[in-house]
Amino acid sequence: MIEHTLPISRQAKLLDISRGTVYYRPKPISPRDQMLMNRIDRLHLELPFAGARMLRDLLRQEGYHVGRSKVSRLMKLMGIEALYRKPKTTQRHPAHRIYPYLLRSLAITRPNQAWAMDITYIPMARGFVYLAAVVDWYSRRVLSWKVSTTMDTHFCLEAVEKAIASHGTPEIMNTDQGSQFTSQAFTGLLKDNGTQISMDGKGAWRDNVFVERLWRSVKYEEAYLHAYETVSAAKAGLDRYFRFYNSRRPHSSLDRQTPDQFYFEALPLPMAA
């Protein structure tokens, strides 16, 4: 919560979160659980289709004595799941509406036509943080990002508000079906800005493939190379990396141009300026 004249209960309602979570203080993660989570994170990037059973078996092959329920609990804490098309699409929150996927067969031909957003787990030397990023689908440019120690709605809202303030409003915003993105606060923000809402099929990682590729780059090129000691160190490292990613890192899918080049060169001159 933020310091505000609104009562805590009202703030929690506006953010569509339980008031109990405001006062909850998470228990420290044990060193063993932290080690398991970091290994699960790497295995998930390598084998995104692996569920709790397969991850348990893979971990046991590596000498980790762990059960399926433990792996499942840690995956939930990390905010990851096996990525494959389920037989049925289920709602993550019974009170939240799920929106259809709008980008299938749609030609993305210009910046700000479609943005994508997602959350990922970032390991530190002790503990972890969550990273949310807004990406322009056309140019792969990271338009804004935020770090949080809790996986709730407010830092997602802050990331979107920052992107809109700096780059204008997108025609379409695509996310997964996480409760942060189906919340009234998040969808209301998009509607207020005239943005169409698009959501992946549950577990359909290919619907948001560009963000999945970004997470792989962020982790292997930055996060796994630096054991961040503090949240501020994580923020500084990620800031450094995203500046490099946008302005210096060439992309084969962009004809070896950088996201900055591809984004700004395609904008109308007044907006690019």
Image: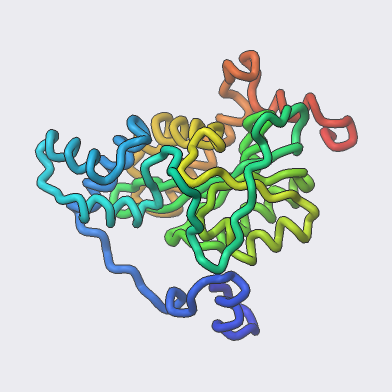
Q: Which of the 4 quarters of the picture holds residue 101? A: top right
Q: Is residue 200 left or right of residue 42?
A: right
Q: Please determine whether, in this image, residue 160 is positioned above or below residue 226.
A: below
Q: Please determine whether, in this image, residue 43 is positioned above or below residue 236.
A: above
Q: How many marks?
A: 0
In the rendered image, is residue 144 in sight? no
Q: Residue at x 27, y 64 (%)?
A: 28
Residue 162 image offset from top left, x and y in percent:
68, 52
Q: Is residue 194 left or right of residue 99?
A: right
In the rendered image, is residue 203 in sight? yes
Residue 216 image offset from top left, x and y in percent:
44, 32
Q: Is residue 193 left or right of residue 39?
A: right
- Indicate the quadrant containing the C terminus: top left, top right, bottom left or bottom right: top right
Q: Residue at x 41, y 39 (%)?
A: 83
Q: Please determine whether, in this image, residue 22 is positioned above or below residue 178.
A: below
Residue at the outermost right position: 270
Q: Residue at x 76, y 37 (%)?
A: 113
Q: How is the image coloured?
A: rainbow
Of residue 52 and residue 113, the one placed in the foreground of this image is 52
Residue at the outermost front position: 87
Of residue 105 and residue 114, the one placed in the foreground of this image is 105
Q: Residue at x 10, y 38 (%)?
A: 63
Q: Which of the 4 quarters of the picture holds residue 242? A: top right
Q: Please determine whether, in this image, residue 94 is positioned above or below residue 252.
A: below
- Indicate the quadrant containing the N terminus: top left, top right, bottom left or bottom right: bottom right
Residue 54 image offset from top left, x and y in percent:
23, 39
Q: Is residue 204 left or right of residue 80?
A: right
Residue 149 image offset from top left, x and y in percent:
43, 59
